[in-house]
Amino acid sequence: MELASWPLLALVCLATTLALLFFPQSRSRKPKSPPGPKPWPIIGNLNLMGPIPHQTLHKLSQTYGPIMQLKFGSHPVVIASSAEIALPFLKTHDHVFASRPQTAAGKYLTYNYLVVTWAPYGDYWRQGSKIFITELFSSKRLESFEYIRIEEIHAFLSRLCAMSGKPVMLKEHISWLTLSTVSRIVLGKEYFSQSDIQTSVVTLKGFQDMLIR
């Protein structure tokens, strides 16, 4: 390179440096994240979550606004706390957010994400959702299952009347009512009983444990 070109090269380098300093828009910018509390190392914002998560999130939204970002461990989570903010997530761009993270729980408990609630968005998910809507959640189907709901509510009230005057853990009986109704509608029969003495595929506690796991 000739000596005469060195001043020109230095001038170009100086001009480029000044452009980057005084015109930051020319540099690539990282998208700005929603506001939120500063996360701790490793655990993120899990230390802020109380025993009733939805109430905790509501209180945090009063500080950081209707859309905020938390970190659950190392995973960033964006939370919409108003109907207006949630609309783009649930309706306008719902296909973008329809898929759940592919965790080990979904892989091994749902036969490699074959259950609609864990399946990634695509043809399989759309077909499964269509079957759910037409076979389980249509108005005609819900009306046809009315007799099951009535029978289970009558059984629920009968159990409570039989325990009149005794302490009652209402949560357990409501859980029994819900699971019994769902099992009869979805599976076609009641698959569990309250105790080991009654003839059944599984006890109520065993059925609940399977759902939790």
Image (cartoon, grey):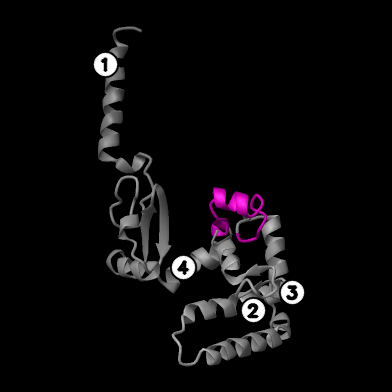
Sequence-wise, the earlier of marks 3 and 1 is 1
* SS at badge 3: loop
- Quarter assignment of residue 11: top left
Tag in front: 4 or 1: 4
Front tag of 4 and 2: 2
Crowding near pointer 2: few (<14 within 10 Å), some, many (20+)?
A: many
What is the crowding at mark 3: few (fewer than 14 residues within 10 Å), some, or many (at least 20)? few
Question: How would you classify the magenta stretch by its main secondary structure?
Answer: loop
Query: Going by the image, does 41 lie left or right of 199?
Result: left
User: Which residue, given by chain and number where applicable, does mark 2 sit on?
Assistant: 181
Judging from the image, what secondary structure is the residue with disc 4 in?
helix
Q: Are marks 2 and 1 in contact (CB under 8 Å)?
A: no
User: What residue is disc 1 on?
Assistant: 7
Q: Earlier in the sequence, mark 4 or mark 2?
A: 4
Mark 4 and mark 3 lie on one chain; the one further toward the N terminus is: 4
Q: Amino acid at mark 3?
A: Gly
**Rendered residue at 56%/63% (across/down):** 209
Magenta stretch: residue 152 in it? no
Image point (36%, 66%), residue name: 51
Whichever of labels 2 and 3 marks the residue nearer the N terminus, that label is 2
Q: From mark 2 to mark 1, how far is it between C-alphas?
A: 84 Å
Q: Earlier in the sequence, mark 2 or mark 1?
A: 1
Q: Nearer the viewer, residue 29 or 178?
A: 178
Magenta-drawn segment: 96-117
Question: What residue does disc 4 label?
Answer: 86
* Numbered tag placed on residue 206 in the rendering: none
Q: Position of residue 180 (x, y in %)?
A: 63, 77
Residue 69, how many percent across, how many down? 37, 57
Residue at 55% x, 67% y is 91
